[in-house]
DNA sequence: TTGAAATTGAGATTAAATATCAATTGAATT
DNA sequence: AATTCAATTGATATTTAATCTCAATTTCAA
């Protein structure tokens, strides 16, 4: 399913669905939450179908372009991604100390945003809300 | 004014208000919108009161800790900061067609976010809300 | 089968940010 | 004024994510 979508995307750009790209795609969808490029690379390295670090990064960018993967944020350390397929919308709270990401969803928040758009004559299609601070654990430390 | 606040902050930590730190503070407030550490360093370099790159980065972190400066976001290239003194918080609506940016502020939204943080045990310090879609003009076209 | 274009991977490169550490400064105390 | 010790500085080295390079390989249509 994801393969088909990705292949269509590649075809349209005159690119090919190689075994390395398939490997990356497969491992991307083996994560059920957020992941960093390096962790993705390590998973692939430890699987039977390999791809180099360069190919992992390259394919990741293609996957973002295709819409199958989203860049969630950029932490102090690295980019953070998640696959969007079959995911319902949510927002994020990001800890500035340990980098942990907490997902949340609020119907009220969604409605309020619609209201704000309406009163501004704006046709809102999507949004990103990122709350930064200290998570439950880290707020006790510092 | 900012000097006083910074000095108080430093004193409380047993640190000193050196001429290098004063130089950084001064140039931070010479920006009237967001800035990157490197641009800040260059401004200082071209001013009469100097500070090394290391000191610029170090002081910047202290300024964030003191609350006088905020880290707005982290782009592909670098961190982005802005001084908070005298600035009021707002969020953004960005048009995907013409790129225009509309600022808005909603008390309700702020309160709702606090509520969400509270119920998640998260100590929220800041947030970025970006609504994307079509502005008043562009929604009629497409 | 052939050839042009795309792709790969190993390693080099880039660049932001931090770490190192000897030399210097600040300021409180004697 | 001299002493003392922690804080500070700056030149440089280091770290590390991400990208770039480019020769070798693969893909696929003709």
Image: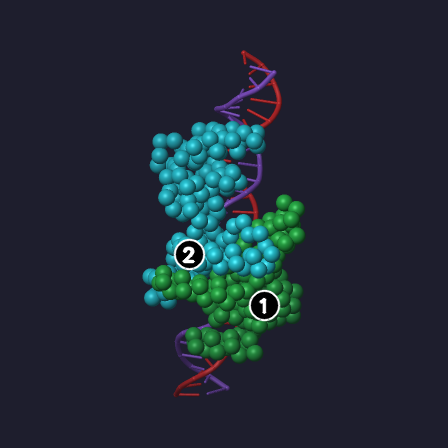
Chain colours: A cyan, B green, C red, D purple
Residue that appears at 34% across and 66% down: A140
Quarter of the picture holding the N terminus of chain A:
top left
Q: SS at mark 1?
A: helix
> Is A7 in front, or is A138?
A7
Neighbor class of circle 2 (other Cα within 10 Å; few <14, some 14-19, many 20+) is: some
> Is B61 in front, or is B35?
B35
> Is A41 in front, or is B127?
B127
Label 1: chain letter? B
Quarter of the picture holding the C terminus of chain A:
bottom left
How many marks do you count on the picture?
Answer: 2
Label 2: chain letter? A
Residue D23 picture location, percent across and down:
54, 28
Residue A10 seen by the camera: yes
Residue that appears at 44% across and 34% down: A2
The relative height of residue A98 versus residue D26 in the rendered view (above or below) is below
Residue that appears at 51% across and 62% down: B71
The relative height of residue C7 versus residue B11 in the rendered view (above or below) is above
- Residue bearing the label numbered 2: A106
Alpha carbon of mark 1 to alpha carbon of mark 2: how far? 37 Å
Residue B28's disc number? 1
Residue A91's disc number? none
**Discs 1 and 2 carry the same chain letter:** no
């Amino acid at each position: 399913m994801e393969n088909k979508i990705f292949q269509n995307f590649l075809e349209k750009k005159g690119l090919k669905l190689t075994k390395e790209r398939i490997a990356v795609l497969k491992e991307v969808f083996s994560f059920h939450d957020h992941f960093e490029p390096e962790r993705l690379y390590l998973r692939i390295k430890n699987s039977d179908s390999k791809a180099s670090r360069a190919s992992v990064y390259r394919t990741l960018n293609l996957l973002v372009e295709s819409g199958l993967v989203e860049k969630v944020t950029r932490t102090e350390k690295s980019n953070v991604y998640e696959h969007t397929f079959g995911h319902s919308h949510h927002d994020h709270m990001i800890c500035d100390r340990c980098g942990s990401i907490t997902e949340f969803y609020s119907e009220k928040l969604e409605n309020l945003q619609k209201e704000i758009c309406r009163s501004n004559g704006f046709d809102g299609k999507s949004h990103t809300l990122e709350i930064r601070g200290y998570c439950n654990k880290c707020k006790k430390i510092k």
